[in-house]
Amino acid sequence: MIMNAKLVIAERIPFDAQKKLMPLFKTRIDKLSSSLDVSVQLGLTASGFVSAEIEGSDSEFLVELIKREMRLAPRDLSEIEINDNLKAFVIGINKKRQGIEVGIGPISMKAKCEVANESLTAQLCDGRDISVERVAQTYCL
């Protein structure tokens, strides 16, 4: 039976590096799918996340391999569950609200994701009162 799957991989490629990095993703996906009966088309979402359309009788198996090796990003808010462990990418620093804005997939364009400075300093700075800019600089965020 031929199955089709559309997914978003939890990897974000900056616009200026897309030509350089997309071939690396293609090579990695080709290695994962080398012995499988699938065809894969890679692309990018508007926010720079790698997307894949997979067709073939082994598509479910490849999707599972990609989940384990690379992780998937939620495409829609309905795909997020309470206490989910998601891979996030720093988008920017919100100096006004004193937090770090993060992206968790294409849905980040619809839903604001932010880590408050209080949470950052509690985890990274033993609760000391340090500005969000200093935390970002110290930890290369």
Image (tube, rainbow, N blue to C red):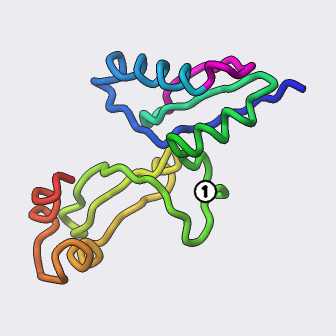
- Image side of residue 43 versus residue 55, left or right: left
Location of residue 14 by image quarter:
top left
Q: Position of residue 16 (x, y in %)?
A: 28, 24
Q: In the depicted view, which residue is nearer to us: 71 or 104?
A: 71
Q: In the depicted view, which residue is nearer to us: 37 or 17?
A: 37
Q: Position of residue 104 (x, y in %)?
A: 46, 52
- Image side of residue 5 versus residue 104, left or right: right
Location of residue 58 by image quarter:
top right
Instruction: State the count of labels.
Output: 1
Location of residue 79 by image quarter:
bottom right
Q: Which residues are magenta?
A: 33-45
Name the residue at 11% across, 71% down: 131
Q: Which residue is mark 1?
A: 77
Quarter of the N terminus within the rendering:
top right
User: Is 126 a magenta residue?
Assistant: no
User: Is 43 a magenta residue?
Assistant: yes
Q: Position of residue 59 (x, y in %)?
A: 74, 30
Name the residue at 20% across, 75% down: 121
- In this view, which residue lies farthest toward the right? 1
- Image side of residue 69 versus residue 58, left or right: left
Name the residue at 69% across, 26% down: 54
2 in relation to 67, above or below:
above
